[in-house]
């Protein structure tokens, strides 16, 4: 994985990322370990931002093996988006807890938490 930070001597970045991802897959046993290595790889890709697009393309090729909905960052992004949707439904449309939960496909407890956060912000 540290190879991402090195000099590729003319080799294209997509091929390098693809080789690294395939090596991670071939040497890891179990979804948990593989997921951990892919998270670490994602950090290295952020350090070398020119690889972001290539990394995304390579990860799409293995998407059938890598369940993004199980990924921590995916779940965090989904929760943030849900929060924003519920917040919008409450503030701009005056939805009740039940209406907002139904429209945003979240639990009533989640809507109540958003509503409580909004009440704290008002104070």
Image: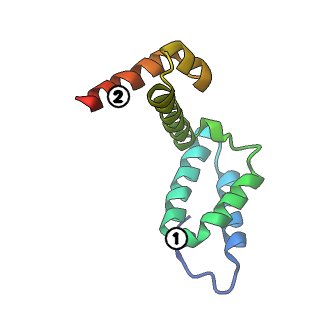
Image side of residue 44 versus residue 65, left or right: left
Mark 2 or mark 1, earlier in chain: 1
Element on which disc 2 rests? helix
What's the residue at 53%, 13% (across, down)? Answer: 98
What's the residue at 61%, 46% (across, down)? Answer: 34
Labelled disc at residue 118: 2
Residue 89's x, y, as percent? 51, 28
Note whether residue 17 is visible.
yes
Q: CA distance from mark 2 to mark 1?
A: 38 Å
Residue 101's x, y, as percent? 55, 19
Element on which disc 1 rests? loop
> Along the line of sight, which residue is nearer the eye, 62 or 23?
62
Image side of residue 5 versus residue 56, left or right: left
What's the residue at 55%, 57% (across, down)? Answer: 42
Image side of residue 88 versus residue 34, left or right: left
Residue 49 in which image quadrant:
bottom right
Note whether residue 22 is visible.
no
Image side of residue 54 versus residue 33, left or right: right
**Crowd tier of the residue under label 2, counting other residues whose Cα lies within 10 Å: few below 14, some 14–19, many 20 or above:** some
Residue 24 in which image quadrant:
bottom right
* Viewport quadrant of the C terminus: top left
93 vs 35: above or below? above
Report the residue marked by disc 1.
48
91 vs 60: above or below? above
């Amino acid at each position: 994985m540290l190879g991402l930070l090195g000099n590729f001597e003319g080799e294209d970045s997509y091929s390098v990322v693809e080789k690294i991802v395939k090596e991670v897959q071939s040497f890891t046993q179990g979804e948990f370990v593989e997921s951990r290595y892919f998270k670490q790889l994602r950090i290295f890709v952020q350090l070398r931002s020119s690889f972001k697009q290539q990394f995304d393309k390579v990860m799409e090729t293995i998407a059938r093996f890598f369940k993004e909905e199980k990924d921590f960052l995916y779940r965090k992004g989904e929760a943030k988006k849900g929060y924003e949707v519920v917040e919008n439904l409450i503030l701009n449309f005056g939805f009740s807890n039940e209406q907002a939960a139904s429209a945003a496909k979240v639990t009533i407890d989640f809507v109540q938490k958003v509503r409580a956060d909004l009440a704290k912000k008002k104070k």
